Image (spheres, rainbow, N blue to C red):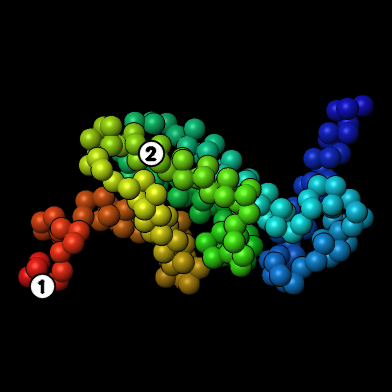
């Protein structure tokens, strides 16, 4: 009996998440109510509260699923000792595939992650920390192999790399990039530019444009 209960719970949870994808994509996160989700999922409003206390918790469930999807992709890659740029591409392309399974919902998902309407909750910060830890492990492994110089700031470097992913994702949403291959090629280019540097000689972090002329 416990197995049947667990199966029913998973089925109900999936129905709620499927309703969220449909309604968040069609109406937006703010204009979708818990009652709307219950009607679309074919369950009572009170049932939803048994799984998620707020709409934010439903949204964070997708963020958690995305992280699990990314971590599985990293775990399944054939060569953990591959160059950093390849490992970063593996991670960011996994994010791209997850976000764009439903175009409009993916746009809302990325917007709420990158530009949330309110300060992050403790659970959201925990998910951020898990993601940054994964990126940090890739950077630390690359540093140990001599691919990148020591002394980098882990948080700022991770933020910089994530910003490059957001630019590529924006290019896909705006139509400048029309396929996953184009997204991958563009990402590889900007990642290599970042890792290799654009300057002919190292720029002092306190130097002004006049000093470098």
Q: Quadrant of the C terminus?
A: bottom left
Q: Is residue 63 left or right of residue 1?
A: left
Residue positioned 27% across, 54% down in the render: 194
Residue positioned 15% across, 58% down in the render: 204
Give whichever of discs 2 and 1 has the lower sequence position: 2
Q: Is residue 57 left or right of residue 68?
A: right
Neighbour class for label 1 at 10 Å: few (<14), some, many (≥20)? few
Q: Residue 1: give x, y in percent of width and height.
A: 92, 26
What secondary structure is found at the residue carrying circle 2? helix
Residue 90's tag is none
Residue ID for mark 1: 210
Q: Foreground residue, 56 or 86?
A: 56
Question: Alpha-carbon distance for marks 2 and 1?
Answer: 36 Å
Q: How many marks?
A: 2
Residue 138's tag is 2
- Contact between marks 2 and 1 (CB within 8 A): the answer is no
* Residue 103 visible from this viewpoint: no
Q: Foreground residue, 146 or 121?
A: 121
Quadrant position of residue 168 = bottom left
Q: Is residue 87 above or below residue 109?
A: above
Q: Foreground residue, 57 or 107?
A: 57
Q: Is residue 85 left or right of residue 106?
A: left
* Residue 109 visible from this viewpoint: yes
Residue positioned 46% across, 40% down in the render: 134
Residue positioned 88% across, 27% down in the render: 2
């Amino acid at each position: 009996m416990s197995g049947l209960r667990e199966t029913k719970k998973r089925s109900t949870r999936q129905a709620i998440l499927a309703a969220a994808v449909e309604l968040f994509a069609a109406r937006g996160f703010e204009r979708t109510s818990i009652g709307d989700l219950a009607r679309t999922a074919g369950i009572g409003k009170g049932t939803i509260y048994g799984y998620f206390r707020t709409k934010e918790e439903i949204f964070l469930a997708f963020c958690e699923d995305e992280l699990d999807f990314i971590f599985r992709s990293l775990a399944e890659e054939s060569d953990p000792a591959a160059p950093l740029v390849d490992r970063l591409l593996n991670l960011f392309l996994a994010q791209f595939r997850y976000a764009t399974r439903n175009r409009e919902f993916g746009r809302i998902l990325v917007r709420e992650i990158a530009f949330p309407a309110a300060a992050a909750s403790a659970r959201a910060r925990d998910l951020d920390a898990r993601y940054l830890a994964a990126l940090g492990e890739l950077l630390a492994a690359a540093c140990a192999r001599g691919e990148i110089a020591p002394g980098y700031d882990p948080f700022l470097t991770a933020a910089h790399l994530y910003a490059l992913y957001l630019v590529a994702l924006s290019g896909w949403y705006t139509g400048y990039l029309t396929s996953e291959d184009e997204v991958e090629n563009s990402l590889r280019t900007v990642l290599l530019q970042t890792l290799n540097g654009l300057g002919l000689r190292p720029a002092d972090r306190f130097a002004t444009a006049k000093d470098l002329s």
